[in-house]
Image (cartoon, rainbow, N blue to C red):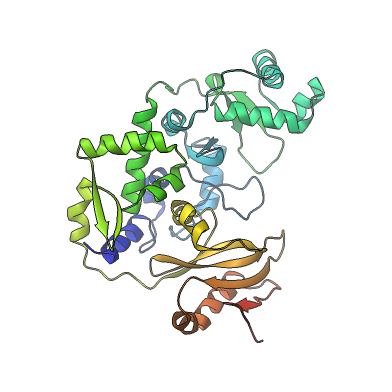
């Protein structure tokens, strides 16, 4: 078993070798859920799985959201994401943050919704006089406990809030317990990444070390997961994938992409990336992905208009930096084509125009 075999199968399963069509998209969405919106984007946008489908999934997800086929909630330590409505009980079981003591503002919101029905935060403020920031904080707390449901069906800011048990009363929120749900989430993650170490699983799921250890140990004992070591890196793999990986004989394609900060691969390696790349005075606008691996990042500032592009930073040796220079700069120019901005630096060297 080689790293190249693992990378190829990972890319294949994630739609990076052959993008999925509309008929296969739902399964990809479910396997990679929760799906966030892009990181650097206007608030209220629909989720999208960039680089992995052969159609405009943003438009498709706008419609799916409007029809409530997919719904918004808070998972993975409070991150906003979308899942298919019928899978909300699965993710709620894993990510529910129970409330042991309700604040006065939380009780006010619950009483309002019980007696008056769904309403926006703006309406709540008009009725109660409570500051919007306090209402928003309380509503999000209740949302993390899967008590409230935020009905985001478009990009409008003035969205209605519902009591989850009233609005989605056909869903069985007792279908899964925490360990069952967590095991399924870990199973999907390992399937989509083929091999992953503890850091990767923790990066994406944001579940506690205690829960993850219990789940992974249980999967190991049950023979569902095996430990593997590739190039001195230890990790986990679904037992059913060992033979699949060893039959892979294709070459990893030399694909070059700029990945969004919320891309599945970035979120799968978030902890490692923070260690690899030093903190910068500029913002990371995206990560550079080449031939199955994240090799660098784009620095600058996001704007509602042309972004300010600053520099390409690569975590490779000088020889590769020089060999890749033209192609890397061309990638950024293609992504930002038509915008009135220009990249200033490449690996600490000023770019001559």
**Percent position of residue 85, x then y:** 47, 33
Q: Which is nearer the eye, 176 or 347?
A: 347
Q: Position of residue 36 (x, y in %)?
A: 53, 46
**Identity of the residue drawn at 41% across and 65% down:** 293
* In this view, 293 is above or below 330: above
Q: Residue at x 35, y 37 (%)?
A: 213
Which residue of the protein is positioned furthest toward the top in this rendering? 115
- Quarter occupied by residue 17: bottom left
Relative to 99, is 55 on the left or the right?
left
Q: Position of residue 115 (x, y in %)?
A: 68, 12
Of residues 124 and 212, the one nearer the viewer is 212
Residue located 67% across and 21% down the image:
106
Q: Is residue 337 visible?
A: yes
Is 28 situated above or below 71?
below
Task: Please state if 66 lies on the left or on the right of 225 as rendered.
Answer: right
Is 66 displayed left or right of 339 in the figure? Answer: left
């Amino acid at each position: 078993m080689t790293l190249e075999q693992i990378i190829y199968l990972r890319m294949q399963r994630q739609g990076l070798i052959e993008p999925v069509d509309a008929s296969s998209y739902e399964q990809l969405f479910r396997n990679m859920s929760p799906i966030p919106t892009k990181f650097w984007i206007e608030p209220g946008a629909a989720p999208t799985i960039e680089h992995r489908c052969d159609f405009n999934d943003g438009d498709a997800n706008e419609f799916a959201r409007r029809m409530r086929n997919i719904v918004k909630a808070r998972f993975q330590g409070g991150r906003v994401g979308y899942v298919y409505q019928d899978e909300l009980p699965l993710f709620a079981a894993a990510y529910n943050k129970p409330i042991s003591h309700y604040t006065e503002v939380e009780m006010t919101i619950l009483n309002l919704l019980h007696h008056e029905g769904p309403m926006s935060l703006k309406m709540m403020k008009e009725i109660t006089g409570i500051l919007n920031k306090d209402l928003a904080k309380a509503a999000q707390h209740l949302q993390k406990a899967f008590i409230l449901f935020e009905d985001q069906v478009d990009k409008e800011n003035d969205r209605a809030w519902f009591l989850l048990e009233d609005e989605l009363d056909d869903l069985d929120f007792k279908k899964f317990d925490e360990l069952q749900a967590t095991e399924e989430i870990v199973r999907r993650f390992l399937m989509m990444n083929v091999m992953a170490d503890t850091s990767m699983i923790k990066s994406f799921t944001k579940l506690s070390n205690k829960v993850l250890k219990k789940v992974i140990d249980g999967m190991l004992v049950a023979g569902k997961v095996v430990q593997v070591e590739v190039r001195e890196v230890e990790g986990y793999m679904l037992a059913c994938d060992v033979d699949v990986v060893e039959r892979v004989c294709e070459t990893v394609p030399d694909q070059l992409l700029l990945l969004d900060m919320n891309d599945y691969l970035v979120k799968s390696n978030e902890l490692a990336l923070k260690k690899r790349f030093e903190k910068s005075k500029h913002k990371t606008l995206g990560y550079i992905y080449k031939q199955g691996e994240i090799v660098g990042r784009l620095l600058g500032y996001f704007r509602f208009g042309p972004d300010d592009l600053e520099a390409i930073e690569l975590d490779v040796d000088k020889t590769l930096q020089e060999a890749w220079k033209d192609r890397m700069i061309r990638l950024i120019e293609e992504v930002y084509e038509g915008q009135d901005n220009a990249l200033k630096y490449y690996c600490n060297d000023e770019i001559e125009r």
